[in-house]
Image (cartoon, rainbow, N blue to C red):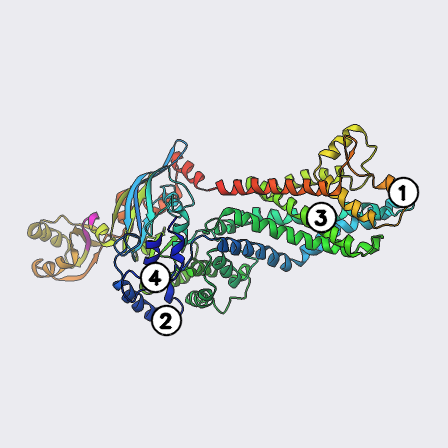
Amino acid sequence: MLLAARGTAPLSSLKGKLSLNERLTQTTNTASHLPEPPQGGPGIPAVSVHGLAKRYGDVEAVKGIDFEVRRGETFGFLGPNGAGKSTTISMLCTLVRPTGGSATVGGHDIVSERDAVRRNIGLVFQDTTLDGYLTAEENMRLHAELYGMPRESIAARMPQVMEMVGLWERRSSLVNTFSGGMKRRLEIARGLLHSPRVLFLDEPTIGLDPQTRNSIWTYISELEQDENITIFLTTHYMDEAEYCDRIAIIDEGEIVVLDTPEALKASVGKDRIQIHTEDDAKAIESLRERFGIEAKIVEGAVTFGVPEGESFVPRLFAELGQPIRAVSVARPSLDDVFMSYTGTTIRDAEATGSDTSRNMAKMMNR
Amino acid sequence: MAIGSPARSVTRPAPAPHHPVARLHVPNRSLRGEIRAIKVVWRRELIRFSRDRLRILTSLVQPFLFLFVLGTGLSKLVSTATHGISFRTFIYPGVLCLAVMFTAMFSAASIVWDREFGFLREMMVAPVRRSSIVLGKCLGGATVATFQGVIVIAIGPLVGVPYELTLMLEMLGLTLLLAFSITAFGVMAAARVSQMQSFMALMQMVMMPMFFLSGALFPVAGLPWLLAILNRLDPLTYAVDPMRKAVFAHLDISPVARHALDPGVTWWGWKVPGLVEAAVIALLGFGMLLIAIAEFSHAE
C-alpha cells in the first residue's frame, strides 16, 4: 500500500494548483526522480490479467483470459454481446468476483485489495448512475465525499473536470433536465473527479448523436495526453475502435486476438485496390501476366487484393502498360477484422444472439 | 494493510532527496472517510426530501384523514366509552406513529428506485464500507420521517394534546426511534425486492396490518385472545403504547378514564414499562439494520 501510494502521489499533490500542461511536466519530472517502486510504478502494467475466469452455474462466461494493458494507453475491448465483455469489465472493477485466475488494476489485486482498486479507477457505465433529483454539482460533491477526497482538492478539481466536459455553467441544474449526451459527459467528469489511474468506459458513446460522440472522443484523447490516464473501453462502433492504441477481441469467453488496430487490419491480409481503365479486360489480362494477380470486375471497377497496396500503386502505374484513369486503395477495416475473428460482423452479433448460452450469460450479467 | 495507514501521513523518510512522499489523492479507508460517507448519504436523503414538496404534503393527508375525519366522525359513536376524552386525542399517538411509519417506508423505498435508476451502483462501487452506505440511508430516512413526525406533533393542540416540553421531547425521541427502525426494516426488504411494484405491494401488506393490530385505534386491554396475541406480536404496538402513555401522562383526566383508555401492554399480566417497549423497538431496528448491512455487503 505504502509503495503503491508513491506511484500516484506526485500527481495528486499537484492537482489543481497547476494547469494541465504544467502539471504534466511537473509530474513527469517528479516521477523520474523517484526510485522505481515495485508496485504501481511505470514498469507495472495498468491492468494485468492472468487466467481470469467467471462461471455462472454451468455457463462459463469468461474462460480464463490473459492480457495486459500498458500505462497510459487506450485499450479497446471488443466483442459480440454476451461474449464476456461486461463480465470481464465488472470483475476488473471489483463488482463481480472471479471464479478463477487473478488480475491487478493499477498494481492492486482485484479480490484482495478491492478498495485500493476502487480508489484508483473511474467508472462510466452504459446506464446512467447519476441521481437525477440532485444538481450536477451535488452529484459531483457526493462522489467526492464517497471517495474521501481532501476538501481543498475538491474545490480545485471539480471546476477543472466539469469545464472539460463543458458543464460547469450548468452545475446548478438538476440532472433530470439534462440530455442523454450531457448526462454521459457529466458521468465522465465524475469518473475523473478523484484522479483515477485507470478509467473504465463501458460503451461511452452508445445511443448518442454523432456530434456528442465526437466531443466525447475529444475528451478521451485529451485525457490520454494531459493526465496520462489509462483508458479501458468497450464499444460497438468499429470506427471508434480505430482510436484505440490496442484492441482485444473477445468471443465466447476467450480473447481471440489482441493487437494494434494497424496490425489487426494487416493480419486480415491484403489491401483492396480498384482501378478504372479504358479497357478493363486488357487490364485484367496484363495484371495476370505481369504481376501474377487475379483481378475481377466489382462495382464496375477492376478489383484485386495485394499486401501493402499503397506501395504497389507506383509499380502499377509504371508497369501496367496502359493508362489508368483512377485508382483507389482501401485498407481492410476493423469490421473486416472483427468479421474474420468472430465469424460475424459486430452488428449481426448484436442483432441475432440466438446462442442460448450467450443469452444466459447476458442475463446473468444483468 | 498493516502498512497502509502510514501512507496517508506526509512525514515519512524520503526514498530519495527532495522527494517527500505526498499522500494519496484518495486516502485509505479510515473512520473519517466512513463518517463522511455516512454523512453524504444522509444529506442526499434530506436534499431529495426538501425538494419534494408534494411528498411532504401528501404524506400529511393520511394522518389528517384519520384525526379529523375518522376521529371526528367516530367521536359521537364512542363518546360514552371515552369518558369525556376526545376520540381524536385517543387515536393521536397511533396516528403520529402511522405518519412516521409511512414516511420512513417511502424513504427506504428510494433504495429500490436507486437500483432501478442505477444510482445504487455509484454507491456500491465507492471505496467505503457498504455498512456506511446502509447506515447513512437509515439515518437519512429516520431524519426525514422524524421531520414529518414533528409536523404532526405541532398540530397536537388541535386535538387536545398540550404543548409541554417534556411531552414533546418524549414524543420526539420515540418518533426518532420508530423512524429509524422502520427505515431499517424497509432497507432490509429493499435489499431483496428489486421491483418497485413488488416493494409497494409488500409494504401495503405489512404496514396496514401492523397499524390496525397495534392498538392505534383501540385500547389494548380486554381483547379477544387471538387479537391480543397478534397485538402483542406486532412491533408497532411497542411504539404506539409508550407514545400513548406519554400523551396521557400529560392529560388531566380521571383514573377511570385513564384505566379504560390507557391500560398499557401486558405480558402475562406484567405491565410492560415504556422504556422496555422503547428498547424492543430499538433492538428490532438494530437487528434489521445488521441484516440489511449483511445483505448489501454480500450483494455483487
Q: Which residue is mark 4?
A: B21
**Is the residue under label 4 in contact with that under label 1 (CB below 8 Å)?**
no
| Membership of A268 in magenta stretch | yes
**Up-down relation of residue A165 to residue A356 (above or below):** below
In terms of image quadrants, where is residue B147? Answer: bottom right
Q: Helix or strand or loop: what does disc 4 sit on?
A: loop
From the top left corner, tell me how far across and down residue A20 is, in percent.
35, 69
Q: Which residue is mark 2?
A: A19
Q: In which chain is the residue bearing label 4?
A: B
Q: Nearer the viewer, residue B254 or A197?
A: B254
- The amino acid on which the numbered mark 3 sits, given as a three-letter code, is Leu
Q: Which residue is mark 1?
A: B255
- The amino acid on which the numbered mark 1 sits, given as a three-letter code, is Pro
**Is the residue under label 2 in contact with that under label 3 (CB below 8 Å)?**
no
- The amino acid on which the numbered mark 2 sits, given as a three-letter code, is Ser
Q: Helix or strand or loop: what does disc 2 sit on?
A: loop
Left or right of residue A191, residue B254 in this image: right
